[in-house]
C-alpha cells in the first residue's frame, strides 16, 4: 500500500520535510516513488502539488494525518 507522508531533511533542531509517496513498509527516509511537496515548520512554508496528490489518492494511496492536515491547510488558504 502506498502512503503519502513526510520525509525529514535538514540538520538537528532545524528540520524541514518533503512530502513523498512511498510504500508503507519502507522506512521514513527511504527512497521515494515521487516527491509531491515541501514543508518547513519553522517558516510555515508549504508547497504541495495538489494535482499529483489527488491522482495518487485515486490510485489508492493513503495520507498520514499530518499530511492530511497540510493538504487541508493549503486548500483552505487557496480559496
Image (cartoon, rainbow, N blue to C red):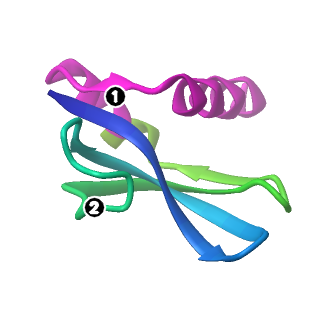
Most prominent secondary structure in the magenta stretch? helix
Looking at the image, residue 71 sits to the left or right of residue 34; the answer is: right
Which marked residue is nearer to the observer: mark 2 or mark 1?
2
- The percent position of residue 2, horizontal first and vertical second, equals 20, 33
Q: Residue at x 25, y 58 (%)?
A: 32
| The label number, if any, that marks residue 54 in the structure image | 1
- The percent position of residue 37, horizontal first and vertical second, equals 48, 54
The kind of secondary structure element at disc 2 is: loop
The kind of secondary structure element at disc 1 is: helix
Residue at the far right in the pictured view: 43
- The percent position of residue 76, horizontal first and vertical second, equals 73, 23
Residue 59 in which image quadrant:
top left
Distance, label 2 to label 1, CA atoms, is 22 Å
Residue at the far bottom in the pictured view: 11
The answer to whether residue 8 is magenta is: no
**Could you tell which of marks 2 and 1 lies nearer the N-terminus?**
2
Residue 31 in which image quadrant:
bottom left
Looking at the image, residue 44 sits to the left or right of residue 73; the answer is: right
Q: Which residues are magenta?
A: 53-79
> Residue tagged by mark 2?
30
Q: Residue at x 77, y 32 (%)?
A: 77
Image quarter of the N terminus:
top left
- The percent position of residue 48, horizontal first and vertical second, equals 52, 48
Whether label 2 touches label 1, CB < 8 Å: no
Of 15 and 78, nearer the camera is 15
Amino acid at each position: 500500500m502506498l502512503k503519502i507522508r513526510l520525509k525529514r531533511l535538514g540538520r538537528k533542531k532545524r528540520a524541514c520535510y518533503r512530502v513523498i509517496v512511498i510504500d508503507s513498509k519502507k522506512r521514513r527516509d527511504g527512497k521515494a516513488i515521487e516527491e509531491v511537496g515541501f514543508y518547513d515548520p519553522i517558516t510555515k512554508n508549504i508547497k504541495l502539488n495538489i494535482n499529483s496528490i489527488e491522482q495518487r489518492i485515486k490510485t489508492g494511496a493513503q495520507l498520514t494525518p499530518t499530511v492530511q492536515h497540510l493538504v487541508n491547510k493549503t486548500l483552505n488558504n487557496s480559496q
